[in-house]
Amino acid sequence: MGINVKGKIAIIGGGSWATALAKIALSNEQQINWYMRRQEQIDEFIRQSRNPSYLTGVEFDTDRINFTSDINKVVKSSDVLIFATPSPFFKGHLKKLRQKLDKKFIVSAIKGIVPEENMVISEYFEQFYNVSPENMAVLAGPCHAEEVAMERLSYLTVACASREKARMLADRLATNFIKTSVSDDVLGIEYASVMKNIYAIAAGICHGLKYGDNFQAVLVSNAIREMNRFCNAMNAVHRDISESAYLGDLLVTAYSKFSRNRLFGTMIGKGYSVKTAQMEMEMIAEGYYATKCIHEINEKVQISMPIVDTVFQILYNRCSPIIEIRKLTEQLM
């Protein structure tokens, strides 16, 4: 059996980004499959015709959705699997999986890294689930779920080693409020998607410390160069770091009121502890986990990354944000 990029789409995850992706998919698809871990969330979703916990303003025609809390059932009955779970919970979902994935088209909408292994999602699927790079795509770009819910114009990049398959998926996700483009820089875009969350935390910390817009601009311009150095070290291919999948995603995550990573950083800058900030947010700030992973990877590759190092010192070594940011200001240009 071959890979069917035009076959049945499944959404894996029940959060805000998964909900936004379901809305996008249902703009073109008559029916989708949708896996959520908790059956009670599914039951309430069907009762209300909307996700009871995330993007509650978006109404769905639940007759067009095949819900299940059984990940094996959704994998077996689907061809294109769009994973949109927080990275810390990613392996927990897969532990229940008994179905093989090597004949499926896997799509990662996870803008995070697999903790412990310190792998981006495509590498993890390739190594542990025998998924070929040609059958693995990544979704990226400046595309906050809240704005998708309001149908505000947004841009998605589909990255895959096979540009033909990337284009097929991109066409399926294009709507009147979603414009799509394609790329073959899977690793670079994945790492950029991970790192922009760290830089958004840095921007939030500086905002919490009452640094102004002038400094934020300097911080972000240094961040994109730092990101570029790291991406080149991990995958030395030609890329235009100013494209929306890189710079655009960084900008919206660093500045937007919808950015949970910026909010998390702002709370840290205002004096919250990591644990208190996490508890009050009630949502995952991917950049917290990404900071440790990228810091550990960089201990091996030794790229100059003063912003990542600063965020690591603040979050994991409990160093003073005031002192660490002040030291950072002396390293920026």
Image: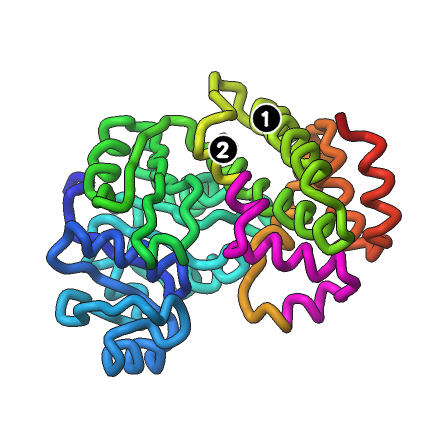
User: Magenta stretch: residue 271 in it?
Assistant: yes
Viewer can see residue 160:
yes
Q: Residue at 53% across / 19% down in the picture?
A: 236
- Please state, as top left, top right, bottom left or bottom right, where the N terminus lies in the image: top left
- Proximity of marks 2 and 1: CB atoms separated by less than 8 Å: yes
Span highlighted in magenta in the image:
251-279
Q: Which amino acid does label 2 sit on?
A: Tyr
User: Magenta stretch: residue 29 in it?
Assistant: no
Percent position of residue 16, x then y: 41, 62
Q: Residue at 57% across / 41% down in the picture?
A: 196
Q: How crowded is mark 1: few (under 14 residues within 10 Å), some or many (20 or more)?
A: many
Q: Residue furthest front?
A: 213
Which quadrant of the view contains residue 140? top left
Per the rendering, the mark at residue 122 is none
Residue ID for mark 2: 246
Which quadrant of the view contains residue 67? bottom left
Viewer can see residue 296:
no
Cα separation, mark 2 vs mark 1, equals 9 Å
Say which of 172 and 219 sits in front.
219
Say which of 253 and 99 sits in front.
253
Q: Which residue lies furthest to the left in this view?
A: 30
Secondary structure state at the residue bearing disc 2: helix
Say which of 114 and 321 sits in front.
321
Residue ID for mark 1: 228
Which quadrant of the view contains residue 43? bottom left
Q: What residue type is labelled 1?
A: Asn
